């Protein structure tokens, strides 16, 4: 191996040497590098070892994927390794950057978890990068979904594990629950077993503890660390029919008779409802008698009001068979096996006239910040971090570093169009799509809800145009639909399922026709989500375009700026659209509305983080075991639960 000048002070010369060797010699050199680079716990890895590790990563990726790491990707991986939260433009290869950092850090970490925003991306990214890992002798696995810990334990022994944060959290809670449920072992049993050659009972039952976490590399970090941070993970037993269903039904019947503002208030900005003094009197007088209560009677009514005012079918949940399936607020994906807690799931079931099943007994819970705090180091990258840089710094101590794109973005964002009604907006959408389809330009339409996506897709079909529909209902066909979305003349209507991590590959005719055109049919509460969606177009220097459509009936305007919505409706021209000059002038106003909504969300996160930190500090002073302290949970958070 003397011809491998890995100790050279020139990183480029080391890279040239690596290119010249066989796969076996590359693996041998990597093993030698691991022994040299391994730093004792608490000590910082030397910069030269990091550069050498990046050279190995680059060569493994080049040989297996045929991709050359360009300087910006190396800079992003380097920033990750040094503890920065990296912003890398959509389409610039965050998946490969995360892999390069994981390989470079492998000599100093016993395990690395690459955390993605959903199971589809975990499977996709692990499959894509596994040849590069295995070329260097590193094992890689995807954490399966479901409650079977015994089947999952082999995945936890991998060097690189791709997983979602909820699945990791539920496994931790299941592991602790199962171990604490075991009968106590007599003192000295473990020593006696070793002396007599017997297998430890916990190990033989597959109940040895999960390995402690070491390093987390979080992809789509703004979604995982911010958008989902306020939703605690609650492990619960399998729910049965709720014994308090008659009480919840009475609460539902009372709630539909209550009015705003006499009986209760509703704040759409914080998604909260509260009874007024008059409302509390009505609720008190209507209390059922002779029924069994699980919680105070006013709580049943408040949950029924929240279900009616704040949760919408095909936006927050799907109705499937006898149950409701939660949808991820940021991505629109199904959260199978997750349930709201504190009677909210029961309230929604009753509203949807489904069998009234209870929450299931809460067995353990953990907040997402507490789960992440168990890692020795947390790194992250996303395409939309800079707008939340202050929050990343204050909540996680992470500094944002923005990496410029490898090739200047050619995306053309056309002036937004503003309409008085949803109907006028959707007619204009289809009118815009038709000529683009005729000239072969692929179009991706982004809808905020499943209901809106289905309505737009039907309007397109009524025009005689074929289109694909991608929503939270279509997980089995997702890869197939995305693979066709970049073909010449393709029309795809999607919810936020297509907004993160989706790489739409264009054929040559689609590129010649102007590249992918993204039509955002409705602004989101967070401008970061809008940026992610239009980031599907004009990736890696390709041509592409985007345009936002707004109507006075959109949820963002009706909930956060009703006066502006009324102004738009009053000043629209006879065809239902604002004049282009007025529509363009509203761009700044809509951005201010989104900023205000984001500020309210950030304030809620700060309050919950402070409460969570205080709770964890108090927990340290209590006896070991499960500590059932009251959680400070917002009424609008989705409390995930999963059967043991």
Image (tube, rainbow, N blue to C red):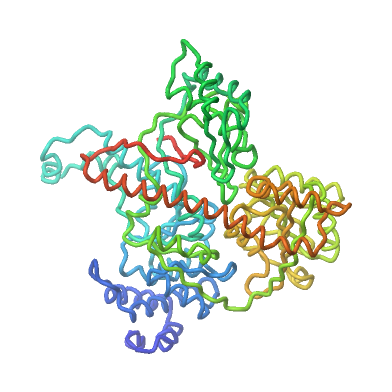
Residue at coordinates 51% horizontally, 55% vertically from top-left?
Answer: 223
Residue at coordinates 35% horizontally, 42% vertically from top-left?
Answer: 173
Residue that lies at the very extreme toward the top in this rendered image? 290
Residue at coordinates 80% horizontally, 55% vertically from top-left?
Answer: 429
Q: Is residue 248 left or right of residue 182?
A: right
- 542 relative to 593, above or below: below
| Residue 567 image offset from top left, x and y in percent | 75, 51
Q: Nearer the viewer, residue 583 or 623?
A: 583
Residue 126 shows in this picture: no
Q: Could you tell me which quadrant the N terminus lies in?
A: bottom left
| Residue 304 image offset from top left, x and y in percent | 55, 28
Residue at coordinates 44% horizontally, 71% vertically from top-left?
Answer: 100
Q: Nearer the viewer, residue 221 or 21?
A: 221
Please count the marks in the image: 0
Q: Is residue 568 left or right of residue 121?
A: right
- 228 relative to 532, above or below: above
Looking at the rendering, which quadrant does residue 409 occupy? bottom right
Q: Is residue 611 left or right of residue 201?
A: right
Q: Nearer the viewer, residue 402 or 81?
A: 402
| Residue 620 image offset from top left, x and y in percent | 24, 46
Q: Could you tell me which quadrant the C terminus lies in?
A: top left
| Residue 617 image offset from top left, x and y in percent | 27, 48
């Amino acid at each position: 191996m003397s011809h491998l000048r890995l100790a050279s002070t020139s990183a480029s010369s080391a890279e040239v040497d690596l290119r010249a060797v066989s796969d076996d010699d590359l693996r041998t050199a990597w093993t030698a590098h691991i022994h040299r680079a391994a730093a004792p716990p608490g000590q910082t890895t030397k910069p030269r070892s990091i550069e050498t590790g990046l050279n190995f990563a680059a060569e493994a990726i080049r040989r297996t994927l045929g991709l050359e790491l360009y300087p910006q990707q190396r800079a992003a991986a380097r920033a990750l390794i040094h503890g920065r939260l990296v912003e890398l433009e959509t389409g610039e290869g965050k998946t490969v950057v995360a892999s390069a950092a994981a390989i470079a850090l492998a000599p100093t970490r016993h395990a690395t978890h690459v955390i993605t925003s959903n199971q589809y991306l975990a499977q996709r990214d692990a499959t894509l990068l596994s040849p590069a890992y295995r070329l260097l002798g590193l094992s890689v696995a995807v954490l399966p979904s479901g409650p079977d810990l015994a089947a999952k334990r082999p995945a936890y022994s991998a060097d690189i594990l791709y997983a979602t944060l909820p699945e990791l959290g539920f496994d931790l809670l299941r592991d602790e629950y199962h171990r604490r449920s075991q009968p106590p072992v007599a003192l000295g049993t473990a020593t006696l077993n070793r002396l007599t050659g017997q297998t430890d009972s916990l190990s033989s039952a597959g109940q040895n503890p999960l390995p402690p976490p070491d390093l987390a590399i979080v992809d789509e970090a703004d979604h995982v660390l911010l958008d989902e941070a306020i939703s605690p993970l609650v492990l619960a037993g399998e729910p049965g029919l709720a014994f308090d269903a008659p009480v919840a039904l009475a609460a539902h019947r009372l709630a539909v008779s209550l009015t705003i503002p006499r009986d209760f208030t509703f704040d759409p900005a914080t998604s909260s409802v509260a009874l007024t003094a008059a409302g509390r009197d009505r609720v008190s007088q209507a209390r059922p008698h002779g029924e069994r209560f699980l919680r105070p009677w006013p709580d049943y009514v408040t949950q029924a009001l929240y279900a009616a005012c704040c949760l919408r079918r095909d936006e927050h949940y799907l109705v499937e068979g006898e149950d409701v399936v939660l949808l991820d607020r940021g991505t629109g994906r199904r959260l199978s096996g997750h349930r709201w807690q504190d009677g909210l799931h029961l309230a929604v079931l009753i509203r949807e006239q489904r069998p009234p099943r209870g929450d299931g007994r809460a067995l353990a819970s953990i907040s997402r910040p507490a789960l992440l705090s168990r890692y020795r180091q947390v790194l992250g990258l996303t395409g939309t971090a800079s707008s939340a840089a202050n929050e990343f710094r204050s909540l996680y101590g992470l500094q944002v570093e923005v990496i410029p794109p490898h090739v200047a973005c050619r995306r053309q964002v056309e002036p937004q169009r503003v309409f008085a009604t949803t109907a006028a907006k959707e007619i204009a959408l289809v009118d815009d799509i038709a000529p683009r389809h005729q000239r072969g330009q692929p179009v991706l339409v982004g809808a905020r809800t499943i209901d809106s996506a289905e309505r737009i897709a039907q309007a397109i079909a009524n025009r005689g145009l074929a289109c694909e529909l991608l929503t939270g209902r279509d997980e089995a066909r997702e890869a197939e639909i995305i693979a066709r979305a970049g073909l010449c003349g393709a029309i795809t209507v999607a919810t936020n399922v297509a907004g993160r991590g989706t790489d739409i590959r264009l054929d040559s005719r689609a590129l010649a026709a102007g590249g992918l055109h993204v039509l955002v049919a409705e602004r989101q509460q967070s401008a970061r989500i809008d940026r992610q969606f239009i980031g599907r177009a004009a990736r890696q220097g390709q041509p592409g375009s985007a345009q936002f459509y707004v109507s006075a009936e959109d949820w963002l305007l009706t909930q956060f700026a009703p006066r502006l919505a009324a102004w738009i409706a009053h000043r629209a021209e006879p065809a239902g659209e604002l004049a282009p000059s007025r529509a363009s002038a509203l761009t700044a106003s809509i951005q201010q509305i989104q900023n205000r909504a984001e500020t309210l969300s950030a304030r809620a996160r700060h309050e919950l983080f402070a409460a969570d930190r205080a709770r964890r500090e108090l927990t340290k002073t209590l006896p070991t075991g499960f500590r059932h302290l009251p959680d400070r949970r917002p009424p609008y958070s989705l409390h995930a639960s999963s059967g043991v």
